[in-house]
Image (cartoon, rainbow, N blue to C red):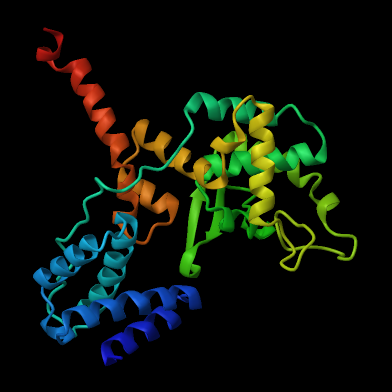
Amino acid sequence: MNRYVDLFFEMMQVERGASENTLRSYFRDLSDFIRFQELEIEKTEAMHINKYIENLRSKGMQSSTINRRLSSLRQFFQFLNKESFRKDDPTINITISLRHKKLPKYLTESEVKDILDTSKEDKTPQGFRTRAIAELLYCSGLRVSELVSLPLSSINKDRPVLIVIGKSKKERMVPIGIPAKKALIDYIGVRNLFIPSSANKSPWLFPARGKNGYLTRNSVSLILKKLAEMSGISSARISPHILRHSFASHLLSNGADLRTLQQMLGHADISTTQIYTHILSDKLKETLERNHPLSMT
């Protein structure tokens, strides 16, 4: 398609270990942009990218999809700039308005507390596993795909952190709190009971039957829904992704910043994390109303 695109894909595959799905996604996004602008990559300016974004909006494309397209362009032009194929990055000052983007659903802190408290009541092996799953998802903000594929070796016995392999095989360290650490210790004590009888041992933290040898994402979802019902919360209001959003929203509302949250969630681009800025806006509004002298009149 283009020699710069070929070099970009080579870098993504060799240096970042991008999956086939990721590469296909980048290929679609970059191909669409190149067809639209009909210019050499070297001549692309910010106005061309803005026109492309407006064209996508005019077609009724969702903000989340447009944001992903822009993220692909950012990665591409950052690469060209870093490798000196371009002297500038035309995407650097371009942002996507989130006003049309659907805000993520999340549970209140009280609801999460009820769920976690309920998980402590079941002292069976299944109960220990359920509690470990719920605690880990909420205290770390892991994607469910990251959770189920955690190897046992990701647990650091001396430090309260997890070694997580996220998207594009990028490794990150995720701190976990004392409750999650305790839940893990209790679960690991019964973990061997979940190893299929056909296997002598398993490298996975959450072993199970199946072709991958670990719990499926659907199994985790069903476990959480059952736990929510036991807590008096509608099963429709919980999922692994909603717990991840709850983690992010509660962190921000209690003083964390977007950059820290970006690292915790494993987002490659800060624009992905900016969906949570509504939490910061609400907090700033609350602080202003509570502390500004004119709000007291």
- Residue visible at 75% across and 57% down in the picture: 207
**Residue 47 image point, x, y percent:** 9, 69
Among the 4 quarters of the image, the one containing residue 230: top right
Out of 193 and 216, give the one closest to the viewer: 216
Q: Residue at x 15, y 81 (%)?
A: 86
Query: Looking at this rendering, what residue extends furthest in the top direction?
Result: 297
Which residue extends farthest right? Answer: 197
Q: Percent x, y for residue 219?
A: 69, 51
Return the x and y of residue 116 as percentages of the image width and height.
Answer: 62, 30
* Quadrant including the N terminus: bottom left
Q: Quadrant of residue 153?
A: bottom right
**In the figure, is residue 147 to the left or right of 74?**
right
Residue 170 appears in the picture as rendered: no
Residue sitting at x 22%, y 16%: 290
Which quadrant of the figure contains the C terminus? top left
Residue under the image location 65 percent in, 26 percent down: 231
Question: Which is nearer the eye, 65 or 186?
Answer: 65
Query: Horizontal placement of 104 versus 281: left or right?
Result: right
